[in-house]
Amino acid sequence: MPAWIRKETQREETGKIDYGRLVLTGPERLLLGAEAVLAAFLTVWLCYRSPFGLPAGLASAFLLLSMKKRELLQKQQQTVLYHFRDFIFSLNAAFRAGYSLGNAFSSAAKDLEALYGARDLTVRETKDIAAKLGYRMPAADLLEDWGRRSGVEDIRQFAQMTAISAKSGGRIIRMLSDSWKTICERIDTRKETESLLASKLYERKLVSIMPMVIIIYLRLSFSGMMASLYGNLPGVLIMTACLAAYWAAVLWSRKIVEIEV
């Protein structure tokens, strides 16, 4: 099992949250491992019908895990952005109530914890920042560090603007309101895009399993014809070429439907 599949929140040696690593629960890890094993088994059984096809099976499992990792990391970043939107809303309300920066962070962190639980990445980050603000650590440095590590452009921009406002005494409430509106618009645009692409994504998944269905059908209905592709070098080369073309098509189709908002 790859090292990046972990149950607990992964952290760097400095103790800070590493947003580039995947956070999975136990059942999610088991499901992902089962999918990788299934991919390896189907590759060996459908394309080679021999233990000599194990390297190709392992390669298929690795490609599947890599794609799943990228997909789940994107979803994780998306969740961070959604929760960050709620954080800004709570932070803005705290500032309007007259809270200081540290108390505003503490109040917003409590609101998020009530919504998403203590293990949520944004909750843990904001609670950590609130604690450090209580020890008089520079708010600008903490926010800029959060923005850099998050990998989310909206958080980086928010951190930079908040740091500038904290240094210069600018209108932080107005800045928070503008940031919240911008993030809401971006999220709405992303949801509309996902709705438009939903049917295409379903078609892509359906097409990606069709080659396996066709091979299974041919093996069951025309076993004599398919037997000539197994147990000999030409058959292995043909099947390997087909497998490479299949994975290239899968990766290309995923690239086509990936739209950054």
Image: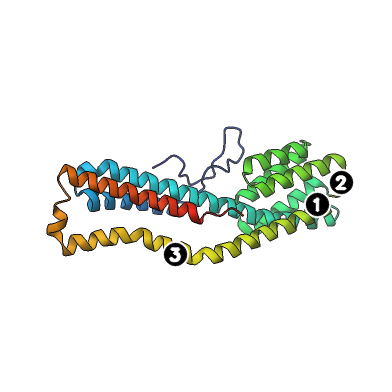
131 is higher (above) or lower (below) than 29: above
Query: Pointer 3: what residue?
Result: 202
In what quadrant of the picture does the N terminus appear?
top left
The residue depicted at 52 percent of the width and 47 percent of the height is 23
- Please provide percent x and percent y for residue 128: 68, 43
Residue 39 on image: x %, y %: 32, 51
Classify 10 Å Cα crowding around label 1: few (below 14), some (14-19), many (20 and above): some
Residue 46, horizontal then vertical, whole percent = 24, 53
Residue 33 tag number = none
Contact check, label 2 and label 3, Cβ < 8 Å: no
Type of the residue with mark 3: Tyr
Question: How many angstroms separate mark 1 from mark 2 (CA)?
Answer: 9 Å
Q: Which residue is mark 1?
A: 175
- Point out residue 256 in the picture as x, y percentages from the top left corner: 49, 54
Image mark count:
3
- First of labels 1, 3 by sequence position: 1
Between 96 and 209, the one lying in front of the other is 209
Compared across the picture, whether 156 is left or right of 99 comes to: left
**Looking at the picture, which amino acid does disc 2 mark?**
Gly
What kind of residue is marked 1?
Met
Residue 82 quadrant: bottom right
Residue at the image point whose x is 46% and y is 53% from the top: 254
Give the secondary structure at mark 3: helix
Q: Are marks 1 and 2 in contact (CB under 8 Å)?
A: yes
Classed neighbour count for the residue bearing mark 3: other residues with Cα under 10 Å, few (<14), some (14–19), many (≥20): few
Residue drawn at x 23%, y 47% is 238
**Would residue 101 be found to the left or right of residue 117 on screen?**
right
Find disc 2 in the rendering and name its residue.
Answer: 170
Q: Does residue 187 sit above or below 235 in this rendering? A: below
Q: Is residue 15 left or right of residue 253?
A: right
